[in-house]
Image: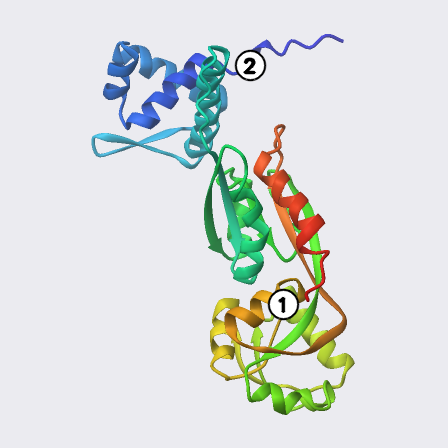
């Protein structure tokens, strides 16, 4: 049976007027750019809001402010019309070579060195990439991703939450874990490892992290009762405390070289059969972001496959 989709089509003229108003902050200024009368643009905005079933602006003082739906619509409109402008330039033989923009949410539980190593390959892409990093709790970042405010989220665990917008999990890789400590802690606790660690001072990540879960499982399997000096949301703080000799901490073997060099610590030993994984979580998009492809391929082929020296 034939179904007429014509009523569902988006009117791109209406979207263009909306985009102009959102960029300029008022209908009057958009009128100057578009050389159209104010009632014309106001009517087109109302038509767009009716077609989308959402209010896009609210009045604030003498200006207009985007609603949550308006912010989402603006991100899409910005991409549509920026790409449209580039298409014209490319067809005229004048490519702009504008750097790609990649907006990434990084879970505050992920070690900073791991986040850097995952994202670093994108920096050397041909044409350039501008990376915007936003750090926060995974739940907050996934909400932003679902609202199309981020291109990607890096996390320790896949996204299973029931968001209105479907999210896709891409396993970047897994890494064994090792324990590190500064001198003289390392000299004392390396003897008889791992049984020597009962009562040893530990700096641990918060309980909701995958790294902490792996550590707790290992402590139980090895019958080790650590002396917990502190629990930290931010793994960078753990590294700083450990560097001063306060306690023992765990980190992925994938960044062992950087951990030893940057924080002047020694590896006590590796945790057998206990790993932590890292995921790139993306939204449902027809065009895969080129920088995300580079990041995923580099992580899977280099970062999480090579053993440290």
Disc 2 + disc 1, Cβ < 8 Å: no
Q: At which x and y percent is residue 82?
A: 44, 23
Q: Which residue is mark 2?
A: 9
Q: Residue at x 47, y 54 (%)?
A: 135
Is the residue 94 above or below the residue 99 in the image?
A: above
Q: Residue at x 29, y 26 (%)?
A: 24
Residues at marks 2 and 1, CA–CA distance in whole angstroms: 53 Å
Q: Earlier in the sequence, mark 2 or mark 1?
A: 2
Q: Is residue 211 left or right of residue 58?
A: right
In front here: 110 or 52?
A: 110
* Residue found farthest to the front: 309
Q: Secondary structure at mark 2?
A: loop
Q: Is label 1 in a helix, a strand or a loop?
A: helix
Mark 2 crowd level (few <14, some 14–19, many ≥20, 10 Å Cα)? few
The answer to which quarter of the image holds residue 34 is top left
Observer able to see residue 156: yes
Q: Is residue 234 at least partly visible in the picture?
A: no
In the displayed image of the protein, which residue is found farthest to the left?
62
Residue indicated by mark 1:
256
Left or right for 90, reference 256: left
How far across and how far down the image is residue 201, in percent?
Answer: 58, 86
Residue at 21%, 34% (x, y): give it. 61
Q: Quadrant of residue 297?
A: top right
Q: Nearer the viewer, mark 2 or mark 1?
A: 1
The answer to which of 36 and 204 lies nearer the viewer is 204
The N terminus, quarter of image? top right
Residue 149 horizontal side relative to residue 297, left or right: left
Callout 1: 10 Å neighbours few (<14), some, many (20+)? many
């Amino acid at each position: 049976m034939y179904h007429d989709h014509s009523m569902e089509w988006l009117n791109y003229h209406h979207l263009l007027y909306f985009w102009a108003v959102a960029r300029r902050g008022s209908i009057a200024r958009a009128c100057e750019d578009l050389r159209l009368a104010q009632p014309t643009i106001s009517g087109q905005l109302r038509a767009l809001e009716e077609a989308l079933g959402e209010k896009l602006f609210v009045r604030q003082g003498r200006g207009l402010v985007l609603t949550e739906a308006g912010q989402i619509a603006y991100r899409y409109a910005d991409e549509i019309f920026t790409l449209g402008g580039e298409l014209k330039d490319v067809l005229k033989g004048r490519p702009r070579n504008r750097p790609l923009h990649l907006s990434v949410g990084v879970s505050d539980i992920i070690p900073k060195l791991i986040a850097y190593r995952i994202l670093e390959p994108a920096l050397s892409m041909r044409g350039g990439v501008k990376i915007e990093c936003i750090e926060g709790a995974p739940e907050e970042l996934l909400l932003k991703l679902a609202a199309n405010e981020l291109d990607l989220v890096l996390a320790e665990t896949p996204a299973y939450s029931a968001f209105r917008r479907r999210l896709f999990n891409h396993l970047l890789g897994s890494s064994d874990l090792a324990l590190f400590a500064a001198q003289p802690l390392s000299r004392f606790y390396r003897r008889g490892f791992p049984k020597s660690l009962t009562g040893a001072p530990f700096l641990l990540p918060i309980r909701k992290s995958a790294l902490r879960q792996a550590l707790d499982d290992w402590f139980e399997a090895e019958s080790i009762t650590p002396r917990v000096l502190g629990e930290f949301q931010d793994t960078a703080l753990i590294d700083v405390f450990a560097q001063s000799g306060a306690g023992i901490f765990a980190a992925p073997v994938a960044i062992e070289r950087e951990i030893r060099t940057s924080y002047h610590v020694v590896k006590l030993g590796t945790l057998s059969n206990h790993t932590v994984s890292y995921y790139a979580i993306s939204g449902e998009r027809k065009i895969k972001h080129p920088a995300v492809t580079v990041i995923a391929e580099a992580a899977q082929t280099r970062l999480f496959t090579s053993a440290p020296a």
